[in-house]
Image (spheres, rainbow, N blue to C red):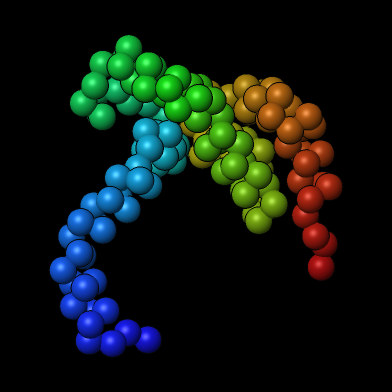
C-alpha cells in the first residue's frame, strides 16, 4: 500500500523510471526474436531485410548481435525451435503443416533442423512429449 508521500515521490520520478526500465529491458536480441516470431508464417526475413526493418545496415546488425553474444541465425533457430516444440506438443498438426507455419521450404528441411536442435525427429519428440488422455 502507498501513502501520499510515496505517491508524490513516484509521480515526481515516474517518467524517468519508465524510460530507465524500458532501456534496461531492451536488447537487439529480443527485438529480432519479436521480428522473427511476427514473420514466421509469411517467411522469416533475411538478415538484410531484418536490418532494413530496424533501420541499420547488415554489418551493424551483425556487430550488435555479436556484442550481445548471438547471431541472426541463432535467434531464428531459437524462435523456430520454440514454436515447433509448442506446436508439436499442444496440437496434433501434421509435420508438413508445422514446417510450413515455421517458414521452412520443405518438411525434410524442417525435420533436419529439428534433429539438430533436439536430437530426435519431430515425430519422435511428439510421441515422447505428448500426454495421452
At x 48%, y 22%, the residue is 71
Residue 59: quadrant of the picture = top left
Residue farthest along the front direction in this orientation = 5
User: Residue 112 location, x and y as percent?
Assistant: 69, 22
| Residue situated in front as seen by the camera: 28 or 51 | 28
Quarter the C terminus occupies: bottom right
| Residue situated in front as seen by the camera: 53 or 101 | 53
| Residue situated in front as seen by the camera: 82 or 62 | 62
Residue 18: quadrant of the picture = bottom left
Quarter the N terminus occupies: bottom left
At x 39%, y 17%, the residue is 62
At x 26%, y 29%, the residue is 54
**Residue 121 appearing in the image:** yes
User: Residue 104 location, x and y as percent?
Assistant: 53, 27
| Residue situated in front as seen by the camera: 130 or 27 | 27
Looking at the image, is 62 positioned above or below residue 82? Answer: above
Looking at the image, is 30 positioned above or below residue 115? Answer: below
At x 65%, y 25%, the residue is 113
Looking at the image, is 67 positioned above or below residue 35? Answer: above
**Residue 48 appearing in the image:** no
The answer to whether 45 appears left or right of 20 in the picture is right
User: Residue 130 location, x and y as percent?
Assistant: 77, 54
**How many dots with numbers?**
0
Residue 123: quadrant of the picture = top right
User: Residue 35 location, x and y as percent?
Assistant: 37, 37
Amino acid at each position: 500500500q502507498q501513502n501520499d508521500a510515496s505517491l508524490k515521490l513516484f509521480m515526481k520520478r515516474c517518467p524517468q523510471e519508465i524510460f530507465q526500465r524500458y532501456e534496461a529491458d531492451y536488447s537487439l536480441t529480443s527485438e529480432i526474436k519479436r521480428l522473427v516470431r511476427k514473420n514466421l508464417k509469411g517467411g522469416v526475413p533475411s538478415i538484410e531485410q531484418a536490418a532494413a526493418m530496424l533501420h541499420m545496415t547488415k554489418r551493424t546488425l551483425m556487430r550488435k548481435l555479436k556484442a550481445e553474444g548471438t547471431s541472426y541465425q541463432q535467434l531464428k533457430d531459437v524462435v523456430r525451435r520454440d514454436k515447433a516444440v509448442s506446436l508439436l506438443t499442444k496440437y496434433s498438426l501434421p509435420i508438413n503443416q508445422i514446417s510450413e507455419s515455421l517458414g521452412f521450404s520443405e518438411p525434410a528441411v524442417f525435420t533436419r533442423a529439428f534433429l539438430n536442435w533436439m536430437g530426435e525427429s519431430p515425430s519422435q519428440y511428439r510421441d515422447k512429449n505428448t500426454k495421452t488422455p
